[in-house]
Amino acid sequence: MGNCLQHRVADEDATKFTLGEDIWDEFNDSYDMNYNYSIVEAAAPCRSCPLLDDSSLPFFVLASVLGILAGGAVLFALLRPLFRWRVCPERPVLVQLAVGSTLFSIVVPILAPGLNGVQSTALCRLAHLLWYGSAFAQALLIGCHACLGPKLGVGHVAGITLWLTVGLWGAALLLGLPVTLASDTSRGLCSLSFNKSPRFLPLLHVVASLTAFTLLPLGLLGTKALTKAWGRWPGPCVSVLWVWFVFWWPHGVALGLDFLVRSKSLVLPTCLAQQALDLLLHLAEALAILHGVATPLLLALFYHQTTRTPLPSLPLSVRRPSHLDPPGGAGSRTTYAVRPAGRDQSRGQRRR
């Protein structure tokens, strides 16, 4: 991915004057001209080699196809065996995470830099809304699952689970609204135009990305460490789903640094530092794109671990009698009340 050809024009122009090299040699010998090329290079603009350019279209398409196939397979596996719904109480959360990663994979080719066929601004904005909205929804779902655990799938709180799901997806779409409003099409390419949009839109987008992708996993790790050290109350439930933040954590950090540089709050000393920041932005975006392929695998692994874990058995005193229990079994046990001996003796004396 990426192809930097910055000096092609200069090389082509240089070949046109090969016949006059002798004349320039005599001119240089006659006039001793010493130029300070370091000053010229310092005045030149700093250009970075883009990692995700037109040549990276196969990467976008391949990541999209693999993500759609993997997400569809996981959704089919989660929704098909309805009779085993109670085996995995966290299944509603897993289904929503699979839907989020699949939606992300669907819109990946629309935002590819090599696909210059997006003429509709509405389609561009919808793609950015699904891109970041699905990512924010997955981050919030994993955070809520870590805090609430299996309670999200328990039957007697189905109403709470429904309203919580609606609230999480609504909040995710609101978090993705600033980047949606800043989307625009230029020469058929869907891109972000923060320079033409109000100043508060990039600020809101950076704050939302830092909170959901960077501060949320750090908060979960810090809370788990504190609760484990103190041991007073149970902390967040650690699971394999936390690996999801590995794919988005660099993206939040890179967006924060880029915003500080663009707002001139952070001044980079050299051009090499600016090129390193641009490379970090593209690497973070490529890693975020790969989460569409990795998330279904994490969901399948989590489902396998949950179904293999034996459910805790209830004590005999809590069990309810069932009509399926055989005679003399645990369900047909009869309890006898033991009366105090003092009352029986007093009643015998009265009868006498």
Image: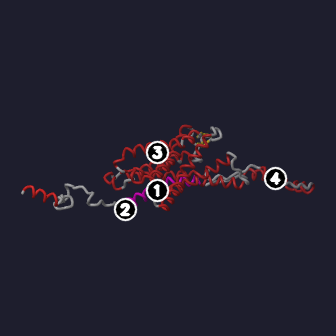
Left or right: 75 as drawn, with respect to 124: left
Residue found at x 32% / y 54%: 84
Q: Nearer the viewer, mark 2 or mark 1?
A: 1
Q: Amino acid at mark 3?
A: Leu
Which mark sits nearer the N-terminus, 3 or 2? 3
Q: Which residue is mark 2?
A: 309
Magenta span contains residue 267: no
Q: Residues within 10 Å of mark 3 (few under 14, many from 20)?
A: some
- Provide the secondary structure element on which disc 3 rests: helix
Q: Which mark, residue 168?
A: 3
Separation of residues labelled 2 and 1 (CA atoms): 19 Å
Looking at the picture, how far across and down is residue 161, in whole percent?
A: 40, 46
Q: Earlier in the sequence, mark 3 or mark 4?
A: 4
Residue at image x 51%, y 60%? 225
First in sequence: mark 3 vs mark 1: 3
| Residue at (47% x, 48% y) in the render | 100
- Tag 1 and tag 4, C-beta contact below 8 Å: no
At mark 1, the secondary structure is loop
Q: Secondary structure at mark 4?
A: helix
Callouts 2 and 4 close, C-beta under 8 Å: no
Mark 3 and mark 4: Cα distance apart in space: 54 Å
Q: CA distance from mark 3 to mark 1?
A: 18 Å
Q: Which percent across, then down, holds residue 121?
A: 56, 37
Asked if the residues shown at circle 3 and circle 1 are in contact, with their CB atoms under 8 angstroms apart, the answer is no
Q: Which residue is mark 4?
A: 39
Residue 236 — which label? 1
Q: Is residue 257 left or right of residue 225?
A: right
Residue range in magenta is 284-308
| Circle 2: residue type | Thr
